[in-house]
Amino acid sequence: MCGRYVITSPVTKTKKLVKSAIQVEDNENYNAHPFQKLPVIKKYNNGNTLENLKWGVVPSWAKQKDFKPLINARLETIDEKVSFKKLIRLHRCVAVADGFYEWKREKENKTPYYFLREDKKLMYLAAIYDNDQFCLITEDADENIKEVHHRQPVIINENDVNRYLNLELTGSSFLKECKKTKLNFHEVSKEVNKPTNNNISLIQTIS
């Protein structure tokens, strides 16, 4: 599961990939969380755009008051689930992140860690969307990450973003074949547990 991440200066960092940014500003968000409007890359006939969508999908067939928004979709079963199989075929997008958080559970204690690319480049997180909402796709964690958590977001490289957004390709198969990204991680403060805490200290290493 991926339930928190970091994104700073999204407009500047994605300018090579997008033609225009729609109501997205170069702000800093060190505690991006579900139900926030967050920047994602979408493909249109005249080029890619960066726009804000709400994190958490409520399927069109569900009653809003009775249905908890879906923030993650498992890559392994995305083609089978009624909530996702149409979206992975027709409605793909890519969320952008500097890094993401995961929590290591040990008995009654949960310790937060911050994950970033080994090369410190921007992360492109495979996602799907429905109207103005999006959902991140997750997969089994790499071996070095499993000591913290058994799942991780599907991360694609910059040169694969447009290929993922190309609906002529089978989305799930493409993601399964993508080259894996090497990640580093370190322990961070439990201040990140509170969504209203939002500053650069959240990603700093706990010594």
Image (spheres, rainbow, N blue to C red):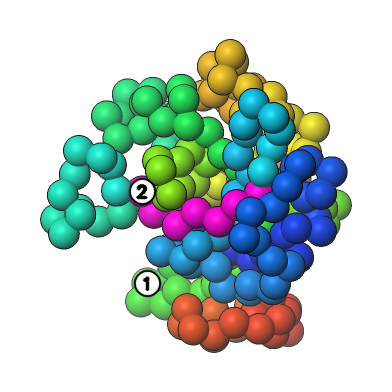
Q: Which amino acid, by three-letter code, is at mark 1?
A: Lys
Packing grade of label 1 (10 A; few <14, some 14-19, many >=20) is few
Label 2 SS:
loop
Is 159 on the left-hand or right-hand side of 77?
right
Depth check, front residue: 157 or 13: 13
Start-end of magenta stretch: 50-57
The residue shown at (69%, 66%) is 25
Magenta stretch prevailing secondary structure: strand
> Any mark on residue 57, and which?
2
Give the Cα separation between the discs numbered 2 and 1. 31 Å
Where is residue 145 shown, x and y percent of the image? 61, 52
Where is residue 6 shown, x and y percent of the image? 64, 66
Is 167 on the left-hand or right-hand side of 133?
right
The residue shown at (45%, 41%) is 129
Number of numbered discs visible in the structure rendering: 2
- The mark nearer the N terminus, 2 or 1, is 2
Q: Which amino acid, by three-letter code, is at mark 2?
A: Val
Residue under pointer 1: 107
